[in-house]
Image (cartoon, coloured by chain):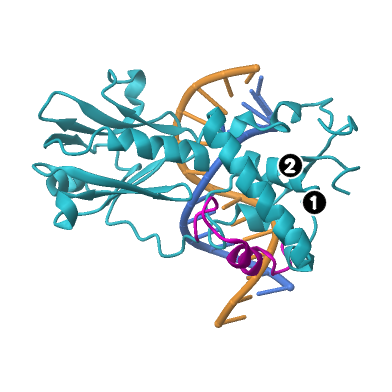
Chain colours: A cyan, B blue, C orange
Amino acid sequence: MPELPEAERARQQIERALGREITAVDDHDSYVCRPHAPGALAAALCGRRLTSAHRRGKFLWVQTDDGDGPVLGLHLGMAGRIAVDEDPAPRNWDRFTIEFADGGRLALRDKRRLGRAVLEPDYSHVGPDAGEVGPQAFAERIGRGSAPLKARLLDQGPVAGIGNLLADEVLWRARLSPRRPAGDLSRTELDRLHCALRGAIADAIRLGGAHTGALIPQRIPGGRCPRCTAPLQRGRIGGRTTWWCPKDQG
DNA sequence: AGGTCTGTTCAGCT
DNA sequence: TAGCTGAACAGACC
């Protein structure tokens, strides 16, 4: 599920759990929980309260005890979500769980175990949030380098929050080829891309996720451009499956 | 059985 | 050195 819109939803879920005393922590999944040592997260968090939930791109972090306690970093990986006050998931899909004094709970629910719960995370490599970055910073950060434009959008360093589906949707909206070297774009094109990004994120948050884009249902064999009905092209760019309209985005 | 998947990191190359 | 690419990670689903 998770791209920026889903991560924002997760942040809002975490806010429902603020202010309650932590009575127990299950961090036994030493692949998802960092540091690996079982009990490290539990020792750091028990007795404290989550006090604020933050997000940049897809990276989440939670303050404890108004900044007096440790920071808890959370990432949803490829298939994770945050479940607050829900019954425990089957098959150990809750990879990290906090229990509260009021009987409620917060879980990182993730079938694939690519999500993360991290004590004192280092997010220094993460760029400005894709939903907040201004046109000038966007142009400077995206419009450089020789990598294909789509690969640059997927890199969380220049701008954070764009995943595979959102990248295809945004490039389609802006009528730009995913294969263009990022540094070759004009400022006009970069501004067009920035506008498309703002629009796509706003729509995705409003409609419930990155999968609600207009192009997304057509990312299938036989799929067609929702604008001009030309058959979509499929390829592999930036290591990910990419769909685009060869006519509009030539 | 084998390929795919809405993400990130790191080794290795240029 | 910096930038870029592709493999690896894990497990469910088709």
**Which residues are drawn in magenta?**
A128-147
Task: Respond whether the residues carrying marks 1 and 2 are from the same subunit.
Answer: yes
Give A14 or A70, whichever is nearer the viewer.
A14
Dot 1 corresponds to which residue?
A176
Q: In the figure, is residue A84 to the left or right of A125? A: left
Q: In the figure, is residue A7 to the left or right of A64? A: right
Give the foreground label among 1 and 2.
1
Residue A42 visible? The answer is no
Where's residue A156, x and y in %? 54, 56
Residue A208 visible? The answer is yes
Where's residue A94, x and y in %? 32, 28
Q: Quadrant of residue A234?
A: top right
Main SS class of the magenta portion in the image: loop
Q: Is residue A144 above or below residue A111?
A: below
Q: Residue at x 66, y 65 (%)?
A: A139
Dot 2 corresponds to which residue?
A242
Where's residue A124, x and y in %? 41, 65
Where's residue A56, x and y in %? 44, 52
Give A115 or A86, whichever is nearer the viewer.
A86
What is the three-letter code of the residue carrying label 2?
A: Thr
CB under 8 Å between callouts 1 and 2? Answer: no
